[in-house]
């Protein structure tokens, strides 16, 4: 058996604006991850692949799944990249601790884990660039017009400064900092959120471009703060970014409630992370405030809250 993992991800700054050419910063979240186990099925016909996913309840042969099924797409695309893969018979079992539809990169992580495990099991491990490209193709099924940031940060497993269509820039973290992630428990409809912003952009292009420019400026300032180790500066920048996201119409009462709770309990700053309209929020905190802020998030309605560090 061959096992491969892929972490979750959190967007620190720049969601939605990144779709329109502005920068974004994202980090891997190793406390949650997707896992793919691949083993041989010697009794099956040549080329047969059996897929099991606990999260989605999938238990089927590859060719019996719809062509637009994400698990079929990533598996078939990976096999197509590997010479002589059609002679093998495989069983692929997927598990994940990343909440689905929460803005933490569940879909991309599953794709990356499968591509890694299958290619490694067949003795032809794919490059990071190839894995990221395969996962991006599947992201189109999940999100319609994805920015590419999820598959990038999850494949490279390092904080990244991302501009669509430009080379990836890895961020050097000047000082380790702590994040708290709070889950609203409301599924984050990323496709709907992206489409909503698109409609606003088409109807009010000048206004939305101004909002995107402001977000881009925040992202650039945040990169400087991260690389210089000026952690306290990230809080006000997160608050600014959240205000702009609210203007775009992608926040929600549940997100607002958790953000207010985190700030009230002593977080440096807080904002939604991902598509919005549900899903998760993040807060920059100090380790000594982790417990109090976690309690405040749970009291405000978070279904779960957990800590992660950036720069370890």
Image (spheres, rainbow, N blue to C red):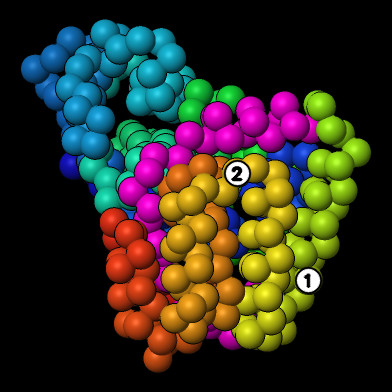
* Viewport quadrant of the N terminus: top left
Q: Is residue 132 left or right of residue 234?
A: left
* Residue at the limit of the structure toward the bottom, as seen here: 288
Furthest toward the right, the residue is 206
Determine if the magenta segment contains residue 200: yes
Bin the neighbour count of mark 1 within 10 Å (Cα to Cα): few under 14, some 14-19, many 20 and up.
some
Q: Is residue 199 magenta?
A: yes
The magenta-colored residue range is: 172-201
- x, y percentage for residue 25? 65, 59
Residue 56 shows which numbered tag?
none
- x, y percentage for residue 278? 46, 45
Q: Which mark is residue 250?
A: 2
> Is residue 186 placed above or below 64 in the rendered structure?
below
Residue 231 x %, y %:
62, 83
Residue 50 at x, y percent in the picture: 21, 21
Tell me the tag on residue 221.
1
**Nearest to N terminus: mark 2 or mark 1:** 1
């Amino acid at each position: 058996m061959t096992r491969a993992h892929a972490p979750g991800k959190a967007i620190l700054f720049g969601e939605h604006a990144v779709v329109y050419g502005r920068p974004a910063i994202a980090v891997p979240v190793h406390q949650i991850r997707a896992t793919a186990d691949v083993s041989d099925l010697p009794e099956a016909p040549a080329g047969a692949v059996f897929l099991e996913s606990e999260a989605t309840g999938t238990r089927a042969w590859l060719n019996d799944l719809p062509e637009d099924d994400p698990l079929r797409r990533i598996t078939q695309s990976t096999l197509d990249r590997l010479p002589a893969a059609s002679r093998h018979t495989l069983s692929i079992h997927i598990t994940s601790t990343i909440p689905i539809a929460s803005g933490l990169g569940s879909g991309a992580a599953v794709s990356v884990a499968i591509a890694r495990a299958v290619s490694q099991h067949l003795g032809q491990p794919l490059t990071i660039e190839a894995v990221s490209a395969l996962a991006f193709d599947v992201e189109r099924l999940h999100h319609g017009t994805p920015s590419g940031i999820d598959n990038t940060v999850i494949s490279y497993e390092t904080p990244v400064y991302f501009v669509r269509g430009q080379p990836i820039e890895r961020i050097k973290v000047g000082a380790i900092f702590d994040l708290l992630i709070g889950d609203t428990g409301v599924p984050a409809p990323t496709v709907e959120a992206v489409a909503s912003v698109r409609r606003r952009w088409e109807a009010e292009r000048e206004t939305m471009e101004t909002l995107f420019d402001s977000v881009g400026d925040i992202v650039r300032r945040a990169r400087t703060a991260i690389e210089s180790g000026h952690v306290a500066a990230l809080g006000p920048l997160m608050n600014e970014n959240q205000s702009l996201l609210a203007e775009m119409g992608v926040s929600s009462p549940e997100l607002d409630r958790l953000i207010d709770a985190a700030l009230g309990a002593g977080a440096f700053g807080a904002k939604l992370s991902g598509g919005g309209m549900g899903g998760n929020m993040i807060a920059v905190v100090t380790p000594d405030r982790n417990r109090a802020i976690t309690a405040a998030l749970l009291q405000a309605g978070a279904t779960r809250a957990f800590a992660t560090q950036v720069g370890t």
